[in-house]
Amino acid sequence: MHILYFASLREKAGLASEEVAPPAEVADVDALVAWLRDRGGKPAEALADLRFVRVAVNQEHVSLRHPVRAGDEVAFFPPVTGGTNG
Amino acid sequence: MHILYFASLREKAGLASEEVAPPAEVADVDALVAWLRDRGGKPAEALADLRFVRVAVNQEHVSLRHPVRAGDEVAFFPPVTGGTNG
Amino acid sequence: MIRVQREDFSVGAEIDRLCAGGSAVGGVAVFIGLVRDVNDDRAVQAMILEHYPGMTERELDRLEQEARRRWPLQEVLIIHRFGRLVPSDRIVLVAATSAHRDAAFDACRFLIDWLKTRAPFWKQEETGQGRQWVVARESDADAAARWSPIAPGGAGADSRPSVAQAPRR
Amino acid sequence: MIRVQREDFSVGAEIDRLCAGGSAVGGVAVFIGLVRDVNDDRAVQAMILEHYPGMTERELDRLEQEARRRWPLQEVLIIHRFGRLVPSDRIVLVAATSAHRDAAFDACRFLIDWLKTRAPFWKQEETGQGRQWVVARESDADAAARWSPIAPGGAGADSRPSVAQAPRR
């Protein structure tokens, strides 16, 4: 599973991407987040407060209940701030 | 008093502008229209159906109750159709 | 700023000039109206725009002032052409710049909606059947009625039945 | 058509190209977003835009498809820049052409409202106090909520609490 971190989450996690191989019971985003938190370290800190975390699986916005499986690209990022400031 | 006709009203009236000197009791647009109609001829035809006539006095949109007096510029025209067609 | 002219204009040059107004501008909303080759199922070969010189400039100027009164805008630009135009020709450009996009969008739409019911322009279409005057559409009055009315003394009194108060948002 | 690029773009050239699409186009609505020198009272020296290559293009493409599904449009253009930008630089352009101005306006505004909540871009501001990430504003979610929601399978599901059904008109 290919994990990506963007923007402030990338900075908190201390890395932009990593390859992980969680056990088969990690079947949705919620479980993946729990598993990544259990590993500890800076990525766990980046995912500490889910109010400020958005998730995309295979480049689509998804909810925490969305399924994940081996081979997926899972991205974590803060709420987006594109366009103008106005 | 300087009278102007625009667009389809100019074509119906057969003239673009004319100088008129109505009597003093012609004190508002309504009375002016009645006076112009009483003269007959093509300008009277142009003003026959007021549903399709809009009025400006001294280059401001006004209602039929708006006062007029000697020296005023009074324009008659159909509803405007500027901008795009879309 | 308002301009009434026979000549064409450059969209890029106009917008670049608006944006050069200062780095407090966050957004520019622009609408450009073009001559269509078909209108209400009639094939249009050309369009002749007549206007009321003097009053046109006054009305557009009032619309700019009214937009500035309603929204915090940095720049306002209205360019309206007259004369003979053919399909794809530019007719009108309205643009507004603001720190915030909502103000720019609202002002731009307000300007074009009201322009269509207040600016003294009249169109004739050239079709295979000759020239006909374009008749004002009810939907244009409806579009202007989306906005709260322009008060007398603001952008001038209105000769039409007064429109219902219909704030947009 | 969508483009994600580091380079600047020419507003005039882009709009002229959109309008060249055919003489059935009656109007073009355009919004151009610029870097402001002040944001929430902070003096901004520069802005760094990061994005998610691949997903950005997919999201913008979906937004174009969704706009085309909702309104009768001829052309849609979204250009979004990334990288380091300074005040007055262009950030984003959205444009829509249609036979009718309402469709062009609504589509243009829909695109910029949704772009701000869906397109994976993140901004950092450079101020006298260093670099800070810009935090998403509640008002942007509110702006997107003006529109009926984008259905899953339409422009993709949404990870945020679902927005109230709030058709604009």
Image: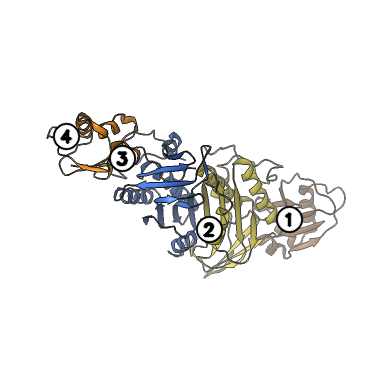
Chain colours: A orange, B brown, C yellow, D blue
Image quadrant in which the N terminus of chain D is located: bottom left
Q: Position of residue C119 (x, y in %)?
A: 64, 53
Q: Quadrant of residue A75?
A: top left
Q: Please tell me whether mark 3 or mark 4 is closer to you in this view.
A: 3
User: Disc 1 residue type?
Assistant: Ala
Tell me what residue is drawn at x 54 percent, y 57 percent: C16
**Alpha carbon separation for disc pair 3 and 2:** 45 Å
Per the image, label 1 sits on a secondary structure element best described as strand
Which residue position holds label 1? B75
Per the image, label 2 sits on a secondary structure element best described as strand
User: Disc 4 residue type?
Assistant: Ala
Tag 4 and tag 1, C-beta contact below 8 Å: no
Which residue position holds label 2? C33
Q: Are marks 4 and 1 on the same chain?
A: no
**Alpha carbon separation for disc pair 3 and 4:** 23 Å
Q: Position of residue D48 (x, y in %)?
A: 41, 47
Tell me what residue is drawn at x 61 percent, y 45 percent: C67
Q: Which mark is residue B8?
A: none
Q: Please tell me whether mark 4 or mark 1 is closer to you in this view.
A: 4
Task: Assess disc 3: are there few (<14), some (14-19) or many (≥20) residues with their C-alpha within 10 Å of its C-alpha.
Answer: some
Q: Position of residue D114 (x, y in %)?
A: 40, 43
**Alpha carbon separation for disc pair 4 and 1:** 76 Å
Which residue position holds label 3? A10
Task: Assess disc 1: are there few (<14), some (14-19) or many (≥20) residues with their C-alpha within 10 Å of its C-alpha.
Answer: many
Which residue position holds label 4? A27
Q: Position of residue B23 (x, y in %)?
A: 87, 52
Per the image, label 3 sits on a secondary structure element best described as helix
Q: In this view of the protein, can residue D72 be seen by the observer?
A: no
